[in-house]
Amino acid sequence: MTDIADAVELAIDDELVTRFSVAADHLPSLLSSLNDTQKLNFYGLYKQATVGPCNTDKPGFFDRAGRAKWDAWSGLGAMGKIEAMAGYVEAMAKIDPTWEDMSLSGGNQPPQSKKPMGPVFSSLVTAQDDDDDSDTTDDRTASNPMSIHKAVRSGDLDVLRQALEQATNQVRLYG
């Protein structure tokens, strides 16, 4: 099937797309009970349903996991996206006949994997951090620089630039 035919069929079969998405979200909760052949089958069907026929070069000889995944995907040949979604949903029904009931009722749901990602900054909270919240960049000196983490948390680009400049100067002094 061509990409255009797949797009038309996907638009027509919203129910299958929804069932496929729910099945894909449910799979992580079952991974520990699946054998490698089952995992590879799901991998190949997922890639075929989301990307289409395999479009990558075969991994090198020493990349055994990569080759197994590639073989599972490329072995599906020119199977259409709709057919792959249907196969994925059927395979899910075979290994867990109650998956749709559980997913629709909200039971045994794995964490949503499609959450937006973004920069995450973490640092240990210390007593000094708690007492130091009122500090501004104005009273910072080379001997008392603002931490880069604190500058990032401030959300002010000028504060971050100043903290980076101070950190760079310290590296020059001590390095």
Image: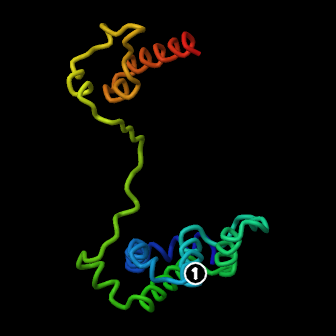
Q: Residue at x 31, y 73 (%)?
A: 109
Query: What secondary structure is marked by label 1?
Result: helix
Q: Eyeballing the image, is 63 above or below 76? A: above
Residue 45 in percent (x, y) is at: 56, 78
Report which residue position mark 1 lands on.
36
Residue 163 in percent (x, y) is at: 42, 18
Tell me the quadrant of the picture where the C terminus can be found. Answer: top right
Q: Quadrant of residue 18?
A: bottom left
Mark 1 crowdedness (10 Å alpha carbons): few <14, some 14-19, many ≥20: few
Q: Quadrant of residue 139?
A: top left
Residue 79 in percent (x, y) is at: 63, 81
| Mark 1 residue type | Asp
Residue 4 in percent (x, y) is at: 58, 70
Numbered label tally: 1
Q: Eyeballing the image, is 151 above or below 105? A: above
Q: Residue at x 41, y 21 (%)?
A: 160
Determine whether, in the image, residue 52 is placed left or right of residue 109. right
